[in-house]
Image (spheres, helix red, strand yellow):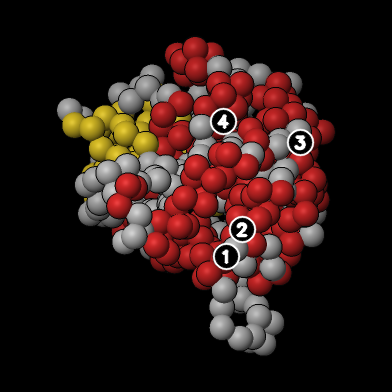
């Protein structure tokens, strides 16, 4: 890998929506292979992810020495995914977590026996531990980093204990930790617990204890309080960043009368999820575009006076609303989960945004993988220019190109 120019991959959060990212990765590798990219070679020096994107990022990084195998493994997992592999969907499991949790919210003041050990979340994601062990090969990750197939891997989580956003990163190089307001970084060997913490959607999945320095803190979803999602890749040395989103970043929203009337609990929760997973990235991409544009106006001498540097970026995001796709597949959810979600309106069309994050069913994930492939192939020239695999038709402007 080049020590002069480093390319980073950043995968956003989004629960089941992260299947879209795998379709994009498969299409990118296909385009690069057609353009003469060396077989199996990893095009990304740095891989970063948050929430479900952290799981995809780590699974990809584990096989960075053979990217074709890495992407094929991810495709097999997401194409055959079932809810039961991520969280308990049987009647007993739902009663123990979801129904108990909702009952406590409604009648907790009457249910004194739950005060000592209240339910921790709406869903029990203990099956995810087994799935992660199936997806990951952590010794191979260590070897890939040591052998230079990957410069660094970073995953993000949010500390409920300390009220801050933390980036955990692993690299063979000496990279000094960085710290900003409400943000910090910690060099650690990435493990399953980091991914459980990063993907712990607030209220939906339980928080996870992690050691941060010499103290144990409880962590939740990495998209929470993520004020600058792309910044870890820059701190780790990236000169160009490919962002793969899991939602319609920067969209203008729905028509005013599309979901008229008082919003359901699921509609409000879906709106909150979109704010957590999408808004921070939208703002960060816009900020990067402004910085790049400003730097392009400076002379070389003036640029030397600032610590800022232009970052080439390409963002690939879904061309269709994923909640609309989810509404077509809600029927594939197990009956206990459908019953639980119907209690808060998540099985209705206006509440489908919430369901789109929890629909870990192959009929839905396959649709998202296909959409990711189609969206990427439609942007073939941009992808190849980004990787410099073909001669660009025009000079690349230092601004963000976004779907």
* Residue displayed at 23% across by 32% down: 216
CB contact under 8 Å: marks 3 and 2: no
Contact between marks 2 and 1 (CB within 8 A): the answer is yes
Q: Earlier in the sequence, mark 3 or mark 2?
A: 3
Q: Which mark is residue 341?
A: 2
Q: Residue at x 76, y 33 (%)?
A: 80
Label 4 secondary element: helix
Between tags 1 and 3, which lies in front? 1
Tell me which numbered mark, 1 or 3, is placed earlier along the sequence: 3
Which comes sooner in the sequence, label 1 or label 4? 4
Residue 344 is tagged as 1
Q: Residue at x 62, y 67 (%)?
A: 345
Compared to residue 333, the image places residue 285 above or below, namely below
For the residues marked 1 and 3, what is the alpha-carbon distance in whole angstroms?
28 Å
Residue 367 location (% of width, % of height): 79, 49
Residue marked by disc 3: 79
Query: How much space separates mark 3 and mark 2, taking CA atoms?
Result: 23 Å
Labels 3, 2: front one: 2
Q: Secondary structure at mark 3?
A: helix
Q: Looking at the image, which residue is at 17% across and 28% down? A: 214
Q: Nearer the viewer, residue 316 or 338?
A: 338
Residue 116's spot in the image, x, y percent? 27, 44
């Amino acid at each position: 890998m080049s020590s002069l120019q480093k390319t980073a991959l950043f995968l956003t959060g989004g629960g089941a929506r992260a299947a879209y990212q795998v379709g994009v990765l498969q299409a990118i590798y296909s385009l690069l292979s057609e353009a003469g990219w060396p077989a199996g070679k990893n095009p990304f020096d740095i891989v970063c992810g948050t929430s479900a994107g952290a799981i995809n990022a780590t699974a990809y990084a584990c096989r960075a020495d053979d990217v074709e195998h890495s992407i094929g493994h991810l495709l097999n997992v997401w194409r055959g995914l079932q809810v039961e592999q991520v969280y308990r969907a049987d009647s007993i499991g739902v009663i123990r977590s979801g129904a108990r949790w909702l009952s406590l919210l409604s009648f907790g003041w009457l249910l004194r026996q739950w005060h000592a050990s209240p339910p921790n979340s709406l869903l029990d994601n203990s099956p995810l531990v087994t799935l992660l062990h199936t997806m990951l090969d952590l010794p191979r990750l260590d070897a890939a980093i040591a052998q230079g197939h990957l410069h660094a891997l970073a995953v993000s989580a949010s500390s409920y204990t300390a009220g801050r956003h933390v980036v955990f990163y692993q690299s063979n190089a000496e990279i000094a930790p960085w710290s900003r307001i409400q943000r910090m970084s910690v060099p650690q060997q990435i493990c399953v617990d980091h991914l459980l913490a990063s993907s712990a959607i607030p209220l939906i999945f339980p928080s996870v204890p992690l050691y941060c320095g010499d103290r144990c803190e409880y962590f939740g979803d990495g998209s929470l309080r993520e004020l600058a999602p792309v910044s870890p890749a820059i701190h780790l040395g990236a000169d160009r960043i490919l962002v793969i989103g899991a939602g319609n970043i920067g969209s203008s929203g729905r028509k005013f009368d599309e979901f008229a009337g008082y919003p359901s609990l699921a509609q409000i929760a879906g709106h909150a999820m979109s704010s957590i997973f999408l808004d921070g990235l939208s703002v960060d991409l816009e900020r990067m575009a402004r910085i790049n544009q400003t730097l392009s106006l400076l002379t070389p001498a003036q640029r030397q006076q600032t610590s800022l540097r232009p970052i080439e970026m390409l963002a690939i995001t879904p061309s269709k609303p994923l909640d609309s796709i989810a509404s077509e597949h809600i029927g594939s959810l197990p009956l206990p989960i459908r019953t639980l979600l119907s209690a808060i309106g998540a099985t209705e069309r206006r509440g489908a945004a919430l369901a789109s994050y929890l629909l870990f069913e192959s009929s839905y994930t396959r649709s998202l993988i296909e959409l990711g492939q189609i969206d990427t192939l439609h942007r073939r020239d941009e992808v190849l220019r980004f990787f410099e695999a073909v001669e660009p038709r025009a000079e690349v402007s230092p601004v963000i190109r976004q779907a």
